[in-house]
Image (cartoon, rainbow, N blue to C red):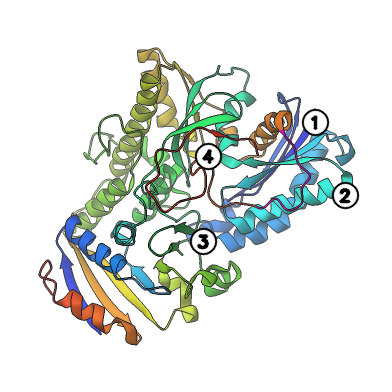
Amino acid sequence: MKLAITLSDLAVTSTLGRYLGETARPGEVITLGGSLGAGKTTLTQAIGQGLLVPPSCYITSPTFSLLHEYPGRLPLYHLDLYRLSDETEIEDLGLLEYLYGTGLSVIEWPDRLGSLMPAERLHIELTLLSETARLAEITGYGGGWEEKIAALRAEPLWRE
Amino acid sequence: MLILGIESSCDETAAAVLRDGRTLLSNVINSQVAVHSPYGGVVPELASRKHLENIYPVVEAALAQAGVGLDDLDGLAVTQGPGLVGALLIGLSFAKAISAVKGIPYVGVDHIVGHLLSPFLEQDQPEFPYIALVASGGHSSIFLVHDHTTIQPLGRTRDDAAGEAFDKVGKILGLEYPGGPVISRLAEQGNPAAIPFPRAWLGQDSLDFSFSGLKTSVANYVHQHQQKNEPFHIPDVCASFQEAVVEVLCEKVLTAARMHGISTVALAGGVAANARLRAVLQDLGAQRGIKIFMPSLELCTDNAAMIALAGFYHFAEKATTSLDTDAYSRSPILHPGPLSGGDSPAPPTVRAAP
């Protein structure tokens, strides 16, 4: 289950993020890949909007603190594994305890998860195309994502 | 009053002994930068493990350099948050253990309050109220400091912290970690006006920061030149990037002073060690009649002297020996009260003392 779309500007990126937030179900995991500046935290901010995280709770980069938790329609757990090197560290830190719970987990730099990578997840790989445009390669792992990817495919805002 | 301060919130394990809130008898910092460098960033679990290895020798060294023993201490001050909980717990548990065994009261201190008060470790001290900018790897915030324990947040970052932007731009440019000092050094040979990187002002009179767009702009610049196989001058990129950060930090903190009618500004946090930031803020302050205070370089970065100092002022209000005090990852100074589901108004003034 795969979909590649062009996010031509920030507004389109926001639409994708808000959709994922609005439709999020408890225990969902979204992993975000892409280089520095690809827009992972920006997409997470839009997911937070969709989840009704109050605007006064700024969704800031969790690079230094590893995990930020926000209140919303569901709790949003924003993890950034950038500074970790392997899965034993992630396990020892207890970060996995947040996954599969009552909230939506958004994980940046998920490659650090190794064998701890959740079987059920939506992965979005972001690539810089130009100053404003991004390529989003969206892959659903596990059964639950077909409906959402089909809905995303039908969205006229972006082209496949 | 003799206070032992302990800090273990992020990179550094540190301990310091402070007499009467003024005289620093020792200030020991065990930097872990060398340990972290191979990974291109701080590694928290590694940090926790290193803190565990470092805490005893660091505290022992601080006591020895001060020429005092545990029995001489009147109080312990320890960083309670914000930071990595696993790392914080090492310092906090260590302080609790000393407190329980020796019967010395301890007080948990907010790391950001430590930074805010760090100008008081110097000879030349600011007068209240003053505006303070705390800029580091994890924080970029402006505060109105009414007194030693009453602090009002005025602005905060909406995405990346200033120091984080330095580290990530360093990574984009393939420089060594941490990015701040390297970029600062290379920038001396570059032209700060070479590349017009964006400044995020976020609307008139906003005291919030945003450095994510600037980071992305540097990534775009590098990416475009690499794609076209065009060479670019790294010192110019460093100087132009640094100038964008420095300009926004200086203008925002001076705007805060103007808005609140305050003529004293203090600078703190690791980014306050940046030579260009210090020079530009000093110049602008002189032009606008604002007195600028900045701690010496060793007191800008994380240290335990500022924790002992903040603890000294907390002890005047309330100390604790409660063993169920917990560490916290996010600062109540920045996020007062429980996060509610509604759209809450701007955070009110909060008391920094526990």
What amino acid type should be assigned to the residue bearing mark 4? Ile
Single out the mark in the foreground, 3 or 4: 4
**First in residue order: circle 3 vs circle 2:** 3
What amino acid type should be assigned to the residue bearing mark 3? Pro
Q: Secondary structure at mark 4?
A: loop
Disc 2 crowd rating (10 Å Cα; few below 14, some 14-19, many 20+) is few
What amino acid type should be assigned to the residue bearing mark 2? Val
Disc 1 crowd rating (10 Å Cα; few below 14, some 14-19, many 20+) is many
**First in residue order: circle 3 vs circle 4:** 3
Residue B242 figure quarter: top left
Kindly give the residue lying farthest to the front in the view shown: B342
What amino acid type should be assigned to the residue bearing mark 1? Leu
Q: In x, y percent, where is residue A105?
A: 42, 68
The C terminus of chain B - image quarter: top right
Q: Which residue is mark 4?
A: B333
Q: From the viewer's perspective, is B106 left or right of B119? A: right
**First in residue order: circle 2 vs circle 1:** 1
* Residue B256 drawn above or below residue B124: below
Distance between mark 1 and mark 4 Cα atoms: 26 Å
Q: Which residues are magenta?
A: B318-326
Query: Are the residues flagged by discs 3 and 4 from a single subunit?
Result: yes
**First in residue order: circle 2 vs circle 4:** 2
Q: Which residue is mark 2?
A: B101
Whether residue A33 appears in magenta in the rendering, the answer is no
Chain letter for the residue marked with disc 3 in the picture: B
Q: Which residue is mark 1?
A: B2
Chain letter for the residue marked with disc 1 in the picture: B
Q: In x, y percent, where is residue A7?
A: 17, 64
Give the residue at x 75% y 37%. B319
